[in-house]
Structure formats: structure tokens, C-alpha cells
Amino acid sequence: MKTFILLLTVAITFMACDNNEEATNQDELLGKWKLIEIRAHGIVNTIDCEDAVLLDFKTDGLFDVEHFGSNVDNACISMGKIDEGTWVNFGNSLYNIDGDVVTPKFDGDILIMVSNSGEETESSGVFERQ
């Protein structure tokens, strides 16, 4: 009986370690990110409700795009899912997001996605974690 309890304790300990490893290895991109500004050619454009989008990156390599707009009371509301796509983490801070290679920079709850399109001037979208 003591052997059984010892084996059970060891098994539970290993299962707990596996869960912790998965949690710490989770991709920072996962979750919901709302676009708050666009930076291009040295100009910063703050996003208002009519241009707001929310990206929802999921663990299965898919993401949804939700659009926002104003209702009759001028409140900013979701207009629903307008698109979806795929994403892949290549490592070394490179991602393929629906065919575009980008370099995300994470700073707490802020995500800055820098385009790697080969343009002379970098453009980037600034997102806030929701």
C-alpha cells in the first residue's frame, strides 16, 4: 500500500510539472488584441471606433477579426466577426499572420506589430491586450 501511495504521489507531481511547463511555454500572441494606433512613415494615427478592430489569436493557429462601429447613441460597439485567418510562430520573433511576415514586440499589455514587407519605411500597428 505504501508503494502505491508513493507511486501516486510521484505521478501527480509529474502531471503538475507538465501543466506548469505548458503554461510557461504559451505563446505571448495568444489572446485578444485591440488596435489602438497605426504608425507609418513617421506619422502616428490614433484609432477611433469606426476603424477599431480586435484580433483574437487562438491556440489552434487560427485568429478572428472583429470590427467595431458606433450605434445610434454614438457608443462604440462590436459589429461582429468580419474575417478570420491563420498564424504561425516561426521563432526568432518572426510570425506569419495570414501570409504576412511580421515581427511582434511585446511590452506588457502592448503589442507592436512591425511589418517585414521590405518597405523602406516600417509601418506598425499598436495593439492593447483585452
Image (cartoon, rainbow, N blue to C red):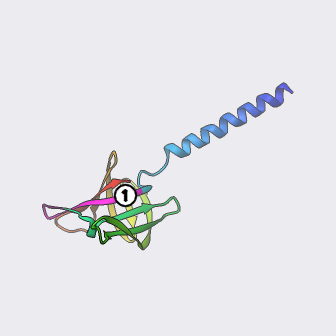
Q: Quadrant of the N terminus?
A: top right
Furthest toward the bottom, the residue is: 82
Furthest toward the top, the residue is: 2
Residue pointed to by mark 1: 33
Task: Say which of 45 and 93 sits in front.
Answer: 45
Q: Position of residue 22 (x, y in %)?
A: 55, 46
Q: Identify the secondary structure beneath mark 1.
A: strand
Label 1: how many Cα within 10 Å (few below 14, some 14–19, many 20+): many
Q: Position of residue 24 (x, y in %)?
A: 49, 43
Point 14% across, 64% down: residue? 41
In the rendered view, does 24 fall on the left or right side of 91? Answer: right
Q: Is residue 42 found inside the magenta-colored segment of the image?
A: yes
Q: Is residue 11 above or below residue 23?
A: above
Q: Looking at numbered disc 1 in the image, what kind of residue is underneath it?
A: Trp
Task: Say which of 123 and 109 sits in front.
Answer: 109
Q: Is residue 110 found inside the magenta-colored segment of the image?
A: no
Furthest toward the left, the residue is: 42
Q: For residue 33, which quarter of the picture? A: bottom left
Point 80% across, 29% down: residue? 5
Q: Position of residue 106 (x, y in %)?
A: 33, 49
Q: Position of residue 84 (x, y in %)?
A: 44, 72
What residue span does the magenta drawing correspond to?
32-45
Q: Quadrant of the C terminus?
A: bottom left
In the rendered view, does 112 fall on the left or right side of 30? Answer: left
Task: Say which of 82 and 18 sits in front.
Answer: 82
In the rendered view, does 95 fall on the left or right side of 12? Answer: left
Magenta stretch, overall SS: strand
Point 66% across, 37% down: residue? 14
Q: Is residue 21 above or below residue 87?
A: above
